[in-house]
């Protein structure tokens, strides 16, 4: 008569070990010898036995899941399909897979961060990685005060209690603007809807123009989408209100939408208008012309977000991290290089 393995106790009895040893072996615990682990794992596979992870997680009050939350803003209009967001989320998912965590991808409206408490109360997630601070700083601080592990991608705000991982936005804005000044641009405009992070990029842009004693024109309010950037630029060009010879775009999607409109109207890039984007998404190197951009390291950023959250889960002290930025100069802005 074939021995039926319905429970962990059945498997342990069949293997001649204790229930705790069988459980550890199935979870690949290094405290159990490799020989014993392989033996028990083979027996489990041969008898079609699997641990009920849902029941185990409920008993242990853990989900083995990390929620990656994309906070949507009607002003920024930056979506879950944004190339930069997709890139860094891919890095996060791979890092979490290595650490045996599942990923729950969530889109959330700005101003509703308080409801994120439900993911912990209902045992849906052990921790949160959030993109988009918006005006939810107090709500995020409240989650921290409740001992909920949360890490936010973005710049650190004065007084916030939660951990952030981000890049030096002020430096990024300065690098983009200084580069355009070096290329001979005299009337440089900043393009993008103001948020906390883009506000810091605008600050860097202003710093560079003030240092060069150049005029600071009013910024163009453009949502973080290709379509809005194309529409706004085309309208300005058709109304003869586009007098700029340099553009600092708050994102690559904005820059790419503007480039399409400029190309359609016969504006030469970079000879008449030089442009620098922000994020350095992979498509930048393949556009026509290739787009100069401020590089944000998604590999380092994604790994730092996961590492910080895992340390919080392990009750370790964690500090916010600011990563460096750098300019990647390409054809869309390099006037002097094109002349050599």
Image (cartoon, grey):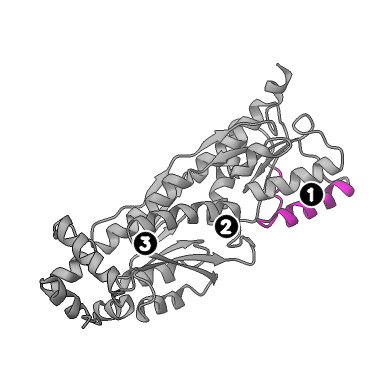
| On-image quarter of the N terminus | bottom left
| Earlier residue among tags 3 and 1 | 3
Identify residue for label 2: 195
- Closer-to-camera residue (110/207): 110
Residue 274: name its quadrant: top right
Task: Give the alpha-carbon distance from disc 2 to disc 1, as whole Å.
Answer: 21 Å
Please determine whether, in this image, residue 33 is positioned above or below residue 209: below
Residue farthest to the top?
A: 340
- Closer-to-camera residue (308/45): 45
Residue at x 28%, y 63% (from the top left corner): 313
Q: Is residue 244 left or right of residue 306?
A: right
| Earlier residue among tags 2 and 3 | 3
Identify residue for label 3: 162
Q: Are marks 2 and 1 in contact (CB under 8 Å)?
A: no
Q: Is residue 157 left or right of residue 185?
A: left
Span of residues in magenta: 217-239
As drawn, the label of residue 233 is 1
Residue at x 57%, y 57% (from the top left corner): 195
| Earlier residue among tags 2 and 1 | 2
- Closer-to-camera residue (193/281): 281
């Amino acid at each position: 008569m074939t021995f039926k393995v319905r429970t962990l106790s059945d498997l342990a009895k069949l293997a001649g070990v204790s229930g705790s040893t069988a459980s550890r072996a199935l979870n690949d615990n290094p405290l159990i010898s490799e020989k014993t682990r392989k033996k028990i794992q083979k027996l489990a596979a041969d008898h079609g036995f699997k641990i009920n992870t849902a029941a185990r997680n409920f008993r242990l009050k853990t989900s083995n899941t990390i929620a990656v939350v994309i906070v949507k803003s009607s002003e920024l209009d930056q979506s879950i399909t944004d190339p930069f967001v997709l890139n860094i989320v891919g890095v996060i998912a791979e890092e979490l897979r290595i650490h045996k965590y599942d990923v729950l991808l969530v889109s959330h409206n700005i101003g509703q961060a308080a409801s994120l408490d439900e993911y912990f109360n209902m045992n849906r997630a052990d921790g949160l990685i959030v993109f988009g601070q918006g005006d939810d700083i107090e709500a995020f601080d409240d989650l921290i005060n409740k001992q909920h592990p949360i890490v936010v991608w973005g710049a650190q705000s004065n007084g916030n209690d939660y951990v952030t991982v981000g890049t030096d936005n002020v430096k990024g804005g300065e690098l983009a603007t200084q580069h355009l000044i070096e290329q001979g641009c005299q009337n440089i405009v900043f393009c993008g809807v103001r948020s906390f992070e883009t506000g810091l990029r605008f600050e860097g842009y202003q710093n560079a123009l003030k240092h060069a004693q150049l005029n600071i024109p009013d910024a163009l309010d453009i949502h973080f989408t290709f379509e809005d950037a194309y529409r706004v630029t085309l309208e300005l060009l058709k109304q003869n209100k586009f007098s700029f010879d340099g553009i600092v775009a708050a994102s690559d999607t904005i820059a790419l939408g503007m480039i399409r409109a400029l190309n359609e109207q016969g504006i030469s890039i970079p000879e008449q208008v030089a442009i620098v984007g922000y994020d350095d998404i992979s498509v930048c190197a393949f556009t026509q012309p290739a787009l100069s951009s401020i590089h944000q390291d998604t590999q380092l950023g994604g790994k730092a977000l996961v590492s910080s959250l895992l340390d919080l889960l392990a009750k370790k002290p964690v500090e916010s991290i600011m990563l460096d930025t750098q300019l990647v100069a390409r054809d869309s802005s390099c006037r002097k290089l094109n002349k050599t």
